[in-house]
């Protein structure tokens, strides 16, 4: 796997889970069920789901930056090496790739 593919997979996973949340109870997630229980109008629910997506993207970016060593995780800043099952190194540019593909 290449770093670009890992980030594309993470992006796809974020979009999938956010889509399930947006479906409410039909998405069969605890968060979706809780959103439905709030009785929000469709417009407000859409904004809330957008905020949830933003929170997931920002927290994922922060974790990736922490793993890459460009930010700290709970006050500890180190570089970690991320490899796929074949031993290919994926780390080194994940934070910039994530930012380019998802945060911009």
Image (cartoon, helix red, strand yellow):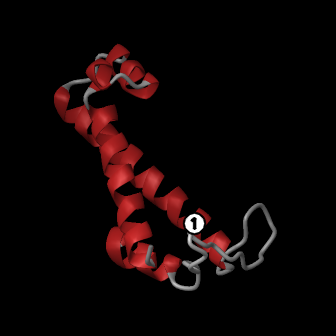
Rendered residue at 43%/73% (across/down): 98
**Picture quarter containing residue 2?**
bottom left
Percent of width and height locating residue 16: 31, 45
Q: Please identify the quadrant where the N terminus is shown.
A: bottom left
Q: Nearer the viewer, residue 7 or 51?
A: 7
Percent of width and height locating residue 5: 38, 71
Q: Nearer the viewer, residue 8 or 39?
A: 8
Q: Nearer the viewer, residue 100 or 88?
A: 88
Q: Report helix, strand or loop for mark 1.
A: loop
Residue 22 vs 87, above or below: the answer is above
Percent of width and height locating residue 35: 36, 24
Residue 85 vs 53, above or below: the answer is below
Residue 25 vs 22, above or below: the answer is above
**Picture quarter containing residue 52?**
top left
Rendered residue at 39%/76% (across/down): 4
Q: Nearer the viewer, residue 53 or 8?
A: 8
Q: Please identify the quadrant where the C terminus is shown.
A: bottom left
Q: Which residue is mark 1?
A: 85
Residue 25 vs 60, above or below: the answer is above
Dot 1, crowdedness within 10 Å: few (<14), some or many (≥20)? few
């Amino acid at each position: 796997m290449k770093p670009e593919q890992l980030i594309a997979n993470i992006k796809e996973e974020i979009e999938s889970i956010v889509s399930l949340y947006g479906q409410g109870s039909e998405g069969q997630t605890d968060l979706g069920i809780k959103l439905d229980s709030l009785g929000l109008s469709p417009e407000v629910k859409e904004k809330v789901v957008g905020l949830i997506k933003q929170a997931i993207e920002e927290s994922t970016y922060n974790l990736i930056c922490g793993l890459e060593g460009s930010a700290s995780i709970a006050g500890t800043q180190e570089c970690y090496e991320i490899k796929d099952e074949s031993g290919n190194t994926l780390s080194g540019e994940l934070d910039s790739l994530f930012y380019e593909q998802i945060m911009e």
